[in-house]
Amino acid sequence: MSLTEFEMFQDRQRSNWVRLRTLNALRWFAIAGQTIALIVAVEVFSLELEVGLASMTVGASVILNLVYGFVFPENKRLKEREAFGMLVFDIVQLSILLYLTGGLNNPFAMLLLAPVTIAATVLHLRSTLLLGVTAIAVTTVLSQFSLPITAATGVELALPGLYQFGFWLAIVVGVVFLAVYARQVTTEMHNMGDALLATQLALAREQKLTDLGGLVAATAHELGTPLATIMLVSGELKGEAVEGTDLHDDLVLIHEQAIRCKEILHSMGAAGKDDLHLRQVPIEALVREAAAPHLGRGKEIVFHFGAEDLLDKRHPIVPRRPEIIHGLRNLIQNAVDFSDTHVEVTASWTETEIRVRISDDGAGFPPSVIGRIGDPFVGRRRVTVDSQKRPGYSGMGLGLFIAKTLLERSGARLKFRNASQFTKTSGAVVDVVWPIAIFTEISDGALGENQNFTAF
């Protein structure tokens, strides 16, 4: 991934804060619930509460919501400090209300979990920790200090000490568990979203390169005839002109430049063509094209091609699709990066499947992460190996994720393992397996029928 794309991901994460309208709507819902709870407690159950102070506490939330609604637009996205401040206010406001209505004897004390859960999904870890500590602190204070709830008969309503301690412990455990759980799920969602966006960018880039190759090939084809005519005419005129004259020298120059243009177009046309012969290619050609950018990087890449127990040794024809080329290229790049001296790329096929195996002679995958290889942001085999093989490299795991996603999109199954698990050799091994029916349905083992020409 390029630096610009990585910065885009970072900006996306930094700007992924909650909207003001969302928090205001949640606060209006809380205000309605608090108001209804106070009315029911006083009018229905005839409980004696500090109604005036409690109403003022609820009114503070009403005033804050009104101020935010008039001062800021509803679609305003809150920054880190702004969202943190609003959630701290919610905890403090609810704590004061609970203090006035029995503390932990009030069953609505469990609502202290809500601001911490919201913080875990939208704020950074530091802000979430501060809010969690604040919620635990006010819960502890409320367990010791609060105004009592008195029934109409004058009896104070209070839980036994053991139940109060259990309620306090449940809230503390809930704050920690919900914060950790919500943050872990949200982090994985963000990582997956960023990784999928990187995959789309990589596929789009590969598609543009493929389209550009077809355009170049078409240009070379169209200009071939005029250049041939120029070469023919200039050659004939050059033979008729007197040597040593300006006319003869000009014709020689024209002829040489026409030859040069032909050579340039021929080299450009070799980069890609938009015809059936390059829409569908033998598996060998596809694998060699994927490995081409890494052939001159100082590591030996050895190719092996062959059928397994088949009388027909012809190479299967597969579609030349950008996602397959880019996925295999990423896997080969990873093998070259971590190999010691050489990389082996083996393509084999049977009557039911096509297999491409990429192996290297490096240190292999660490057992601790081999089960998670291919997940986004699980990127490095070993820190020491990385620092030796790729100085200054700090991978995010997007390369293998992109390769895995693109190849699975083409119908392949991927398996990551270490060669030392089955043989005496070391190094990482990646198997990419396609059911051969996927390709035969597309190509039918041929390059297509000849196209009819229309007479003019």
Image: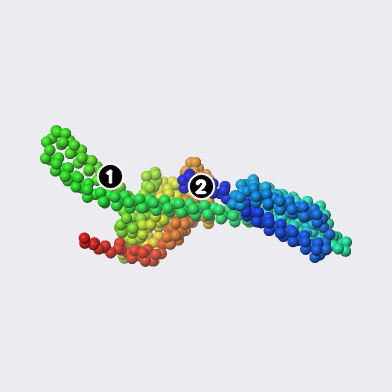
> Alpha-carbon distance for marks 1 and 2?
37 Å
**Nearest to the observer: residue 313 or residue 395:** 395
Taking the image as shown, residue 164 lies to the left or right of residue 202, namely right
Q: What element carries label 2?
A: helix
Label 1 neighbourhood size at 10 Å, few (<14), some (14-19), many (20+)? Answer: few
Of badges 1 and 2, nearer the viewer stands 2
Label 2 neighbourhood size at 10 Å, few (<14), some (14-19), many (20+)? Answer: few
Total marks placed: 2
Q: Position of residue 330 (x, y in %)?
A: 43, 51
- Residue at the image point whose x is 21% and y is 62% from the top: 455
Chain-order first, disc 1 or disc 2: 2
Kindly identify the amino acid type of the residue bearing the numbered disc 1: Ile
Kindly identify the amino acid type of the residue bearing the numbered disc 2: Met
**Nearest to the observer: residue 205 or residue 94:** 94
- Residue at the image point whose x is 57% and y is 48% from the top: 15
Q: In which quarter of the image is residue 454?
A: bottom left
Q: Is mark 1 on a helix, strand or loop?
A: helix
Taking the image as shown, residue 18 lies to the left or right of residue 7, namely right
Q: Position of residue 137 (x, y in %)?
A: 74, 50
* Residue 427 appears in view: no
| Residue under numbered circle 1 | 264
Taking the image as shown, residue 154 lies to the left or right of residue 32, namely right
- Eyeballing the image, is 70 above or below 452? above
- Residue at the image point whose x is 77% and y is 55% from the top: 55
Q: Where is residue 190 in the image (x, y as percent from the top left)?
A: 55, 53
Q: Position of residue 244 (x, y in %)?
A: 14, 33
**Nearest to the observer: residue 391 or residue 274:** 274
| Residue under numbered circle 2 | 8
- Residue at the image point whose x is 79% and y is 62% from the top: 41
**Nearest to the observer: residue 35 or residue 155:** 35
